[in-house]
Image: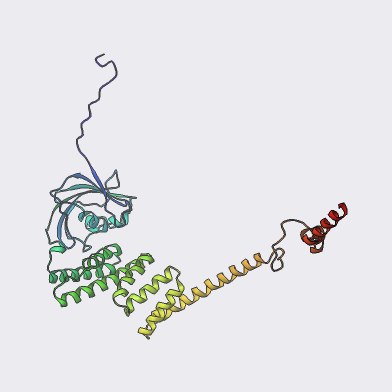
Amino acid sequence: DKHADGAVITVALEQIFETKDVSFNKDKSMMKKQVKEGEGYDTAKDGAKAKLNVEAATDGSSALAGFSAQTLEITVGNGEVCDALECAVCEMKKGERAIFTVTNPAAAAEEKLGLKDVKADKVVFTLELIEFEKSKDTWSMSEEEKVEFANSRKEVGSQLFKAGRLQMALGRYKKVADMFSYIDNFKEENNKVKAKVLKQACDANKAAVYLKLKDFTEAKNSCNAVLKEDTQNVKATYRRAQAELGLKNFSDCIRDCKKVVELDPPNKEARALLKQAQAGQKEEDKKAKGLFANMCKALGKGPIPEPGKSASLGNFSDDEEDAPMDVAEEKDVPMEDAAEEKQEEVAKEE
């Protein structure tokens, strides 16, 4: 009775959640929902020490069998924990709490938490980043520090690659390559040379990862980055040949394989790849030849007009189509004869 127009509802906004895709490929397979804001703006950097508290792990409703809550002390980016936790920790601020949902269970398998084998369709972690070491930004490092840091991250990437942690390895290689995308401002020539070598090595290693992931276009791009600076680089040329084979660019693959054999005659892998490319090109040529033959057969059907004449548009006889010139001449009286006839008529009248 107090409110004639209906009920009155009072709504109070208690909390705002921030949800972020922190997966490697931004495919929403790892979503972080912030439930408690952290301190400041800084997040844990690659190579920094961090302490992460994993409070709970469920399938979205029930606790996962075998799970044991732990506070993990890790070096960010070294692959000391599963891919999911690695992705989460580098996107959290100090003191931040988050609900972390992983739809690829294999990425959340962590033996330290009792989750060596995960049977659920998804894993939902409750996390809190207790603290992390504040390390230098790469832009604030000296030339020597940059080279030393890059070399250590490259080595970590190689270890991760050998362990089959491809996305983690790719992240380390990318970081080094990006660090040295511009080195003209280096003052020490020795550091510049080392930086260039590290960048080329990481670009070549990126290509190796992309080949494993079957991303042949990115593998080719990474090789091109190396070959732009070093046209005689055997490793990059061979990996580009592998990428060209994956893209079915057989002629380009053959070209690169021949170059590898020229630069490194004993290279058995390049010779084997060359045979694959030649077989692939032969098959492509065979298909193209068959397609051309079918096109020629199709073009050969139907009447072919004589040179200088277009094909007939209807069922007309030759006589109907082309009137003889003498018939036309009989109908068209020459101008001179017409004038003479006119003069004779005038004379008769006179």
Query: In the image, what residue occupies the spot 29% across and 45% down?
Result: 60
* Residue at the outermost bottom position: 265
Q: Position of residue 269 (x, y in %)?
A: 39, 79
Residue 324 vs 126, above or below: the answer is below
Q: Quadrant of residue 158?
A: bottom left
Query: In the image, what residue occupies the spot 22% across and 58% down?
Result: 112
Residue 297 vs 267, above or below: the answer is above
Query: In the image, what residue occupies the spot 21% across and 64% down?
Result: 78
Q: Position of residue 224 (x, y in %)?
A: 33, 71
Q: Quadrant of the N terminus?
A: top left
* Residue at the outermost right position: 348
The residue lying toward the viewer, choosing from 185 and 108, is: 185
Q: Colour scheme of this structure image?
A: rainbow
Q: Position of residue 126 (x, y in %)?
A: 22, 48
Q: Quadrant of residue 188?
A: bottom left
* Residue at the outermost top position: 1
Query: In the image, what residue occupies the spot 28% across and 44% down?
Result: 62
Q: Position of residue 197 (x, y in %)?
A: 23, 75
